[in-house]
Amino acid sequence: MDIKNSPAYIYNTHLEAEDAIRSLSKSGFDVKKLSLIGKGYHSEEQPIGFYTTGDRIRSWGGNGAFWGGIWGLLMAPAVFFLPGFGLLAMAGPVVTALVAALEGAMVVGGLSAIGAALSQIGVSDKQIIKYEMALKVDKYILMVHGNADDLAHAHSVLADAVAAT
C-alpha cells in the first residue's frame, strides 16, 4: 500500500539533491518513486532550454547537465511556468498530480497550482506553505513516494544527508 502523505526533503543546492538521489539509487531504492521540484536556473547570459529528442530529454543552460542527468533517472520530466514561482523543472509522480490539478481546475481555495498538486498527494497545508517558500528561494524539494518500507529505506539512506524534512 502506498503512503499518501509522502515525506519531502529540502536541499539548498542541486548538488545536494543530486547526491541524495544517487545515494538512494546506489542503495537499491527504486528512483521512479521519487519526485524532484526546483527552479533549476538563474538569470545568465546564455540561453536556457529544454526539449525532447525521441524518448530523451535534452537541456542546456546553467544547470542543464544537472537536469539532464536527473531526468535520465526519474520519470515524467516536465517544465512549467507557474505564476509566483516562474519556471519550475520537475520529475516524478508529482508531475502527474500537477497536470491533474491544472487540467481539472483544482486550483481553488487560495492554493497555487503547485500547492494544489501537493495537496492532491496528501501534503498538509502547513507543509505546502513550507515547500512553496523553499521553492521561491531556489531550493529543491525531493519527495519520496511508496509504501512504509520504501519510506523507511529512503529515510535510513537520507538520514545522514544535509536535508530537512
Image: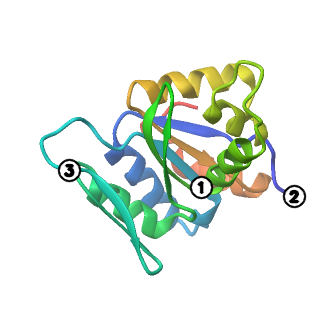
The C terminus, quarter of image: top right
N-terminal label among 1 and 3: 1
Q: Can you tell which of label 1 and label 3 is closer to the viewer? A: 3
User: Which residue ends up furthest to the left in the rendered image?
Assistant: 45
In terms of secondary structure, where does tag 2 sit? loop
Find disc 1 in the rendering and name its residue.
Answer: 34
Residue ID at (37%, 33%): 12
| Three-letter amino acid code at the position of disc 2 | Met
Residue ID at (34%, 39%): 13
Find disc 3 in the rendering and name its residue.
Answer: 47
The spot of residue 104 in percent (x, y) is 78, 44
From the viewer's side, name the closer residue of 45 and 12: 45
Instruction: In the rendered view, tell whether residue 126 sits above or below residue 154.
Output: above
Q: CA distance from mark 1 to mark 2?
A: 16 Å
Residue 1's label in the rendered image is: 2
Residue ID at (39%, 53%): 18
In terms of secondary structure, where does tag 3 sit? loop
Q: Disc 2 vs disc 3: Cβ atoms closer than 8 Å?
A: no
Picture mark count: 3
The spot of residue 29 in percent (x, y) is 59, 65
User: Which residue ends up furthest to the bottom in the rendered image?
Assistant: 54
The spot of residue 99 in percent (x, y) is 67, 50
In terms of secondary structure, where does tag 1 sit? strand
